[in-house]
Amino acid sequence: MKTYIDQSAQFLKQRGFDVPEIGIILGTGLGQIVDKIENAIDVSYNHIPNFPTATVEFHMGKMIYGDLAGKKVIVMQGRFHVYEGYTLRDVSYPVRVMHALGIKKLLVSNAAGAINLDFDKGQIMLIEDHINLQGGSPLAFKGVSKLGTRFTDMSTPYDRDMSDKIEAIAKAKGITLHKGVYASVVGPQLETRAEYRYLKIIGADAVGMSTVPEVIVANHLDLPVAAVSVLTDECDPDNLKPVDIDDIMAAAAKAEPDMIQLFMGLIEEL
Ligand code: HPA
């Protein structure tokens, strides 16, 4: 696997992805931050050797390199999901490539449903911890120990320093920021009422279909990571309405400017 990772990284280096400091993975409906990147170079996922083959829906997916808030960043616009048929290793592969390119920190965003009913859609939750409900591990393969320690410690999966900084920025800018536990499911179907009840009982504050594999791999690589969920719907089992994707996208769009402020503020401080 190391050879594959190095080939992908080498290709991007040749395209000008020289000295990235920070990697950023953007969630569904959260792509606007790319407009703020200066001196941008982009490469489509389907041109990068050994990258998971982009699906039709994701022909738009690309990696962008450039300057953001004074730092060299790589931004992944669009990510791979297990619900598209990719494996957990596939969806976390780009993290390994960004690490090989030299990133020192990783920022992750996603769209998620609010299990904690004190949270409103359109607000943001800083992920403090997670529950992996995707039925496997991105580290469960032969040869994993050549890339990092197999029995990766997950006692502090989200970097305290970055998370504290995000909280301070939210406070300074008057942005409501919740904190909580993110549960990752496979999807793509939404949850039943019984599943929302279950998620609440086991301690989840938000639920989504991504992020956890990438965060596990970041921990495997000793790469400090912070993550936020943009809350797009309220998962109240006793008052559940059919899901409306337009509604979810609208809630993501509403919270996106706040998310951009948090990320740019953090990048400036790193
Ligand atoms: N469940 C799972 N994933 C989601 C949800 C949800 O309610 N909302 C946005 N992503």
Image (tube, grey):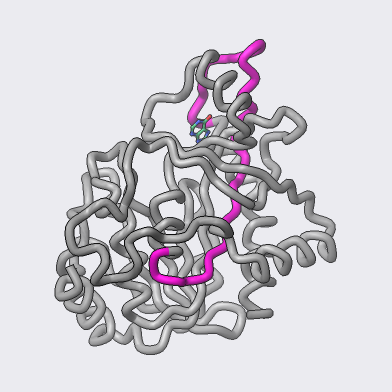
**In this orientation, which residue lies closer to the viewer: 62 or 146?**
146
State left or right for residue 189 relative to residue 37.
left
Q: x, y (%) of residue 137? A: 33, 47
Residue found 30% across the figure and 55% down from its top: 139
Residue 241 lies in the magenta stretch:
yes
Q: Is residue 153 left or right of residue 119?
A: left
Residue nearest the observer in this picture, 4 or 54: 4
Asked if residue 110 is positioned above or below residue 231 in the image, the reply reads below
Quadrant location, the C terminus: bottom right
Q: Which residues are magenta?
A: 220-246
* Residue 20 appears left or right of 193: left
Question: In the image as oriented, which residue stretches furthest toward the top?
Answer: 238
Q: Which residue is pictured at 23% across the width and 40% down the height?
A: 85
- In the shown orientation, is residue 258 left or right of residue 62? right
- State the residue in front, 133 or 27: 133
Q: In the image, what residue occupies the spot 32% across and 64% down?
A: 94
Q: Please identify the quarter of the rendering in which residue 75 is found.
A: bottom left
Q: Is 149 covered by the magenta stretch?
A: no
Q: Residue at x 49, y 16 (%)?
A: 192
In the rendered image, the quadrant that contains the N terminus is bottom left
Quarter assignment of residue 161: bottom right
Total marks in image: 0
To which quarter of the image does residue 163 belong? bottom right
Give how far across and how far down residue 150 sits, in percent. Answer: 32, 61
**Residue 223 picture location, percent across and down:** 47, 71
Furthest toward the front, the residue is 151
Name above or below for residue 264 compared with residue 83: below
Above or below, comparing residue 243 to residue 93 in the picture: above
User: Which x, y percent locates residue 160?
Assistant: 66, 65
Q: Is residue 203 above or below residue 215?
A: above
